Image: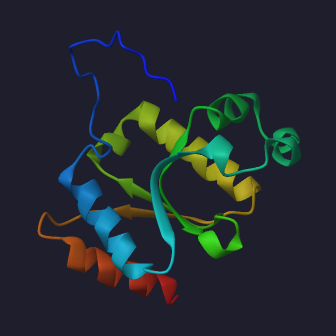
């Protein structure tokens, strides 16, 4: 084992989640999918087979493939951590033109890969973890 002795005195780490809403949604997914692993902020390139998919993508999609992330992915660890469900938690930040373009590219890449992505947008500030659980269960029963 090695250890680097010269380390900055300043802590540059950041929290994994950017909002209370993301934390609530994460816990709602954990409680809904108790037998599975929930990972936040997963790179698209870690989820899809580039070799099989690259010829289907536009040049912009090819670039985005290596920089885009999925907010939440449910994995089945019993099947080698196969991704089962993909979730995006949208907010007002997704209403900006640049974000809308990225969202469309992400949706297109996943559609070409045969993957369904579920987008959820909180309309009511009173929606909490329990409400997210109800919504996720409703979506799964469709």
Query: Residue 130: x, y in percent?
Result: 22, 79
Q: Nearer the viewer, residue 17 or 81?
A: 81
Query: Whole-percent x and y of residue 58?
Result: 76, 35
Which residue reaches farthest front?
Answer: 1
Residue 63 shown left or right of residue 98 in the figure: right
Judge whether 66 appears above or below 41 on screen.
Answer: above
Q: Quarter of the image holding residue 51?
A: top right
Disc count in the image?
0
The residue lying toward the viewer, choosing from 104 and 55, is 55
Depth check: give the residue in front, 84 or 6: 6
Res. 22 image quadrant? bottom left
Residue 64 percent coordinates (x, y): 62, 33
Q: Residue at x 50, y 84 (%)?
A: 140
Residue under the point 29% across and 46% down: 17
Taking the image as shown, residue 78 lies to the left or right of residue 133, namely right
Please give the name of the residue rendered at 38% of the width and 71% of the height, measured from the top-left corner.
29
**Residue sticking out furthest to the left:** 126
Which residue appears at 67% of the width and 41% of the height?
45
Q: Is residue 43 above or below residue 90?
A: above
Q: Is residue 12 above or below residue 128?
A: above
The image shows residue 25 at horizontal and vertical percentages of 31, 64
């Amino acid at each position: 084992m090695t250890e680097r002795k010269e380390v900055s005195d300043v802590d540059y780490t950041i929290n994994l989640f950017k909002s209370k809403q993301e934390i609530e949604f994460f816990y709602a997914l954990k409680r809904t999918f108790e037998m599975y692993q929930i990972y936040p902020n997963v790179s698209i390139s870690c989820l899809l087979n580039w070799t099989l998919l690259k010829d289907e993508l536009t040049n912009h999609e090819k670039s985005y493939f290596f920089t885009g992330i999925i907010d939440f992915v449910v994995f089945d660890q019993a099947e080698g951590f196969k991704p089962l469900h993909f979730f995006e938690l949208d907010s007002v930040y997704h209403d900006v033109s640049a974000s809308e373009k990225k969202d469309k590219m992400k949706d297109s890449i996943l559609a070409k890969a045969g993957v369904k992505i579920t987008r959820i947008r909180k309309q009511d500030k009173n929606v909490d973890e329990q409400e997210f659980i109800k919504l996720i269960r409703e979506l799964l029963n469709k």
